[in-house]
Image (cartoon, rainbow, N blue to C red):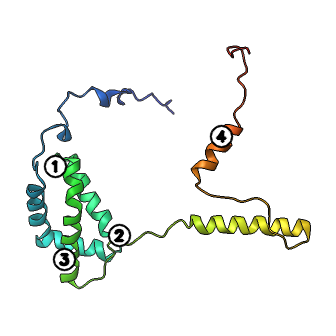
Amino acid sequence: MEAKQPRLDAPIPGMSLTHELGARPWQQPAQFPTVEDAVEHYTSRMMSDEFSDQLVDIMDMGIPLTTIANTIQLAGVMEGKHTVDVGLLLLPVLIETMMLIGDSAGIKYKTGLDDAPRSDRDSLAKRTVEKLKAEIKSKDGEDKEPDIMIEIGSKKDMTEEIEMEEEKPSGLMARRN
């Protein structure tokens, strides 16, 4: 049995950084420099039967329209069709066009524009305070309110804490008093 030979045809580290400036599509002037030009390009492309059929299948899978639109515009940026800022301004038009295609096909779709469920930081803070109150109540055996008040996100309290926790400099390069 032969010993494995090292593979010497692999790319050299940093090789991707050695391409000539302008050799990549996104380093060239955009094919569609204005939002109007890009909208015309994408809407004509999206209204084709082939694209519409594929889009309906993807929408039927439950993938949000915002995800699809982001993918389309990012691919356009990488191909040099338009710039990033034109792509971001293009997103609402792409989503509306996809909604029109989904409505005409009669399928249910997720837009992705709904408010995402919040992380419930307020309720988490309330639960933490209630837990602290319960701990104090169980320790004391009484039904009194704790003396501490917790404010979350108060910038004033945070700066006071930082000032109080400030340590005196020490070490080899510290100034002597």
- Tag 1 residue: 82
* Mark pair 2, 4: CA separation: 41 Å
57 left or right of 6 in image: left
Work out how far the residue at label 1 is from the one at label 2, CA to CA, in angstroms. Answer: 24 Å
Label 4, on which residue?
A: 162
Q: Amino acid at mark 3?
A: Leu
Residue 127 position in % (x across, y down): 68, 68
Q: Residue 75: in sight, yes or no?
A: yes
Q: Which residue is mark 2?
A: 112
Quadrant in the rendering for residue 167: top right
Q: Earlier in the sequence, mark 1 or mark 2?
A: 1
Three-letter code for the amino acid on which mark 4 is drawn: Ile
Tell me which numbered mark, 2 or 4, is placed earlier along the sequence: 2
Disc number placed over residue 100 in the picture, else none:
3
Quick check: marks 2 and 3 in contact, CB under 8 Å? no
Instruction: Inspect the image, locate mark 1, and give the three-letter code of the amino acid beneath it.
Output: His
Contact, CB < 8 Å: mark 2 with mark 4? Answer: no
Q: Name the secondary structure under disc 2.
A: loop
